[in-house]
Image (tube, helix red, strand yellow):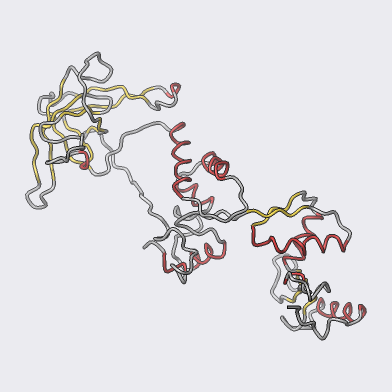
């Protein structure tokens, strides 16, 4: 259905120029006057129905102060800026696809150099939002600590969380450019980071939830150093020496009193290998009488089973560990997803996306 023409549509050029100059001088208040392009009120594309190209905004400008109070709209400034700056291809997201006829019309009518506008699908990641407006709201309302909050999908946030430029570029290469909207699983971004860190990072052993292991047949005052490869993906990374002693820490999850059938880690009477070290066997264990949690594991070690030796004994599991007397405290931050649902932009699930924040 054709649009309804404004009663001011057929003013003379002279009258329009005079009114526009008065707009520029600040004689009208915001919203009282606008300048519109006279195109086609019967167009099937709403954007072509005499769009506004200049409006009044009476707010101080960071450069010109109060000297200028009329500003072009995005649809008018976009093609002109691209043309003036010699842009060859103006890349926009799909919501600008029906703005392209207007982009072309301005450049053709003004006889300017004509860049090409190309639309592509916006990147959407699961369990987060990428809208600048929504991210701004998260920051301004204090739902996150700032633009560099490690949960934020910003360059500053990703840098603080440990993402590398190479991982982000790899992610972009993998997803490519599409014309159909879709949601990319955040796990793919994490996979790209793991791939990159796996190639470049030196290995260390960290025990997050420790339980003490005492090797009852290991000399009490003895400390030896075992050789550990810094990065198995990079032979040039070399090796390091790791202290090994009578008292160690392993992860509490690596021991079970009554293991299920496919649990191959440490259990009463079972043997496992300590990474870069020896094979040990659990002989006994002690519980905390108040909590019932495992407090100490009493094990024996096989002195002939050191990693790198010719000993042929095989076990089904290898555990990481740290020497209790040489362990240092570390601060480990485990970040969960920013939102509880895969698509917080879906209003059927989240009428207000803030409602779906992960507390």
Residue sticking out furthest to the bottom: 7
Viewer-nearest residue: 191 or 155: 191
- Report whether 167 appears left or right of 40: left
Residue sticking out furthest to the front: 1
Q: Is residue 39 above or below residue 280?
A: below
Image quarter of the N terminus:
bottom right
Viewer-nearest residue: 336 or 223: 336
Residue located at (71% from left, 53% from top): 118
Q: Position of residue 344 (x, y in %)?
A: 46, 63
- Report whether 162 appears left or right of 49: left
Residue sticking out furthest to the top: 310
Quadrant in the picture for residue 268: top left
Image quarter of the C terminus:
bottom left
Q: Position of residue 199 (x, y in %)?
A: 46, 31
Viewer-nearest residue: 72 or 57: 72
Q: How many marks?
A: 0
- Report whether 137 appears left or right of 320: right
- Report whether 149 appears left or right of 34: left
Quadrant in the picture for residue 226: top left
Residue located at (49% from left, 49% from top): 158
């Amino acid at each position: 259905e054709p649009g309804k023409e404004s009663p001011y549509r057929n003013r003379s050029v002279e009258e329009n120029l005079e009114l526009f100059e008065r707009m520029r001088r600040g004689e009208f208040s915001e919203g009282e006057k606008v300048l519109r392009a006279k195109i086609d009120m019967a167009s099937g594309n709403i954007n072509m129905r005499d769009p506004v190209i200049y409006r009044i905004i009476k707010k101080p400008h960071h450069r010109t102060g109060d000297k200028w109070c009329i500003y072009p709209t995005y649809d008018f400034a976009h093609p002109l800026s691209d043309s003036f700056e010699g842009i060859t291809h103006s890349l926009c997201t799909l919501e600008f696809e029906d703005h392209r006829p207007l982009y072309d019309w301005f450049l053709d009518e003004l006889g300017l150099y004509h860049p090409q506008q190309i639309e592509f699908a916006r990147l959407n990641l699961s369990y987060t939002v990428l809208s600048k407006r929504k991210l701004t709201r998260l920051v301004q309302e204090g739902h996150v600590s700032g633009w560099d909050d490690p949960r934020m999908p910003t360059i500053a946030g990703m840098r603080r969380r440990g993402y590398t430029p190479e991982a982000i570029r790899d992610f972009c290469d993998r997803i490519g450019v599409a014309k159909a909207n879709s949601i990319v699983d955040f796990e793919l971004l994490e996979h790209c980071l793991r791939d990159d860190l796996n190639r470049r990072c030196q290995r260390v052993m960290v025990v997050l939830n420790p339980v003490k292991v005492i090797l009852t047949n290991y000399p009490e005052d003895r400390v030896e150093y075992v050789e550990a490869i810094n990065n198995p993906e990079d032979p040039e990374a070399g090796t390091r020496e790791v202290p090994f002693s009578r008292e160690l820490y392993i992860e509490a999850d690596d021991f079970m009193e009554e293991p299920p059938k496919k649990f191959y880690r440490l259990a009463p009477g079972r043997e496992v290998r300590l990474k870069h070290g020896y094979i040990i066997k659990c002989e006994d264990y002690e519980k905390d009488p108040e909590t019932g949690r495992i407090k100490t594991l009493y094990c024996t070690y096989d002195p002939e089973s050191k990693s790198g030796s010719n000993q042929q004994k095989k076990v089904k599991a290898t555990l990481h560990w740290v020497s209790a007397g040489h362990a240092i405290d570390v601060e480990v931050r485990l970040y969960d997803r920013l939102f509880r649902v895969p698509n917080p932009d879906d209003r059927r699930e989240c009428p207000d996306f803030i409602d779906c924040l992960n507390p």
